[in-house]
Amino acid sequence: MPPAGVTLPPLTYAHLLLIGTATRVVRYVNYASFTFMVWDMLLTLPDEVKYIWKARWTVIKVVFLSNRYVTPIILIGNLYTISGQAKDLSDQYSSLLSLLLYPVSRFSSPVTVTVTVNRQ
């Protein structure tokens, strides 16, 4: 709902097309990201076994392994949700799931990229 005193323009066919296109682009980017991540995991698995699995437990190892293996789980849930197959998830459950996974995803990703758009 818009704030009091704010009127929204009517939703037109062009707006609906734009929303549909944006949704499709987001899905494709997520599928491509997941595919690239799995490819990278398979490509670097021998080095991971050699240097990480056989190393002693440290904070860095825990952060690396959580980033390596928690992120795909979060992405799978995200792909399921945006694929349109998650019809059995209610809005409340979906929102709760997002709230629960957000801190985990923020912790598991050591690098965060923030994009700011200046509108003039």
Image (cartoon, rainbow, N blue to C red):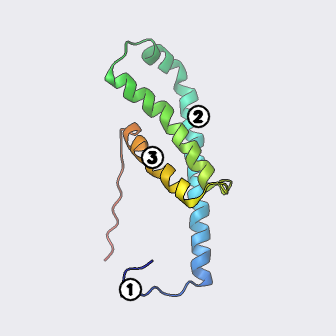
- Where 30 sits versus 60, above or below? below
- Where 86 sits versus 103, above or below? below
Asked if the residue under mark 3 is in contact with the one under mark 2, i.e. CB atoms within 8 Å, the reply is no
Residue 82 appears at what percent x and percent y? Answer: 60, 55
Q: Residue at x 44, y 51 (%)?
A: 99
Label 2, label 3: how many angstroms apart (C-alpha)?
A: 27 Å
Q: Is residue 20 left or right of residue 116?
A: right
Q: Name which residue type carries label 1.
A: Val
SS at mark 2 in the image: helix
Q: Label 3 crowding class (10 Å Cα cut-off): few <14, some 14-19, many 20+?
A: few
Residue 111 appears at what percent x and percent y? Answer: 36, 41
Q: Earlier in the sequence, mark 2 or mark 1?
A: 1
Q: Label 1 crowding class (10 Å Cα cut-off): few <14, some 14-19, many 20+?
A: few
Q: Nearer the viewer, mark 3 or mark 1?
A: 3
Q: Which mark is residue 100?
A: 3
SS at mark 1 in the image: loop
Q: Earlier in the sequence, mark 2 or mark 3?
A: 2
Q: Name which residue type carries label 3.
A: Leu
Q: Which mark is residue 39?
A: 2
SS at mark 3 in the image: helix
Q: Residue at x 44, y 30 (%)?
A: 66
Q: Nearer the viewer, mark 2 or mark 3?
A: 3
Q: Which mark is residue 6?
A: 1
Label 2, label 1: how many angstroms apart (C-alpha)?
A: 47 Å
Image quadrant assignment for residue 61 = top left
Q: Earlier in the sequence, mark 3 or mark 1?
A: 1
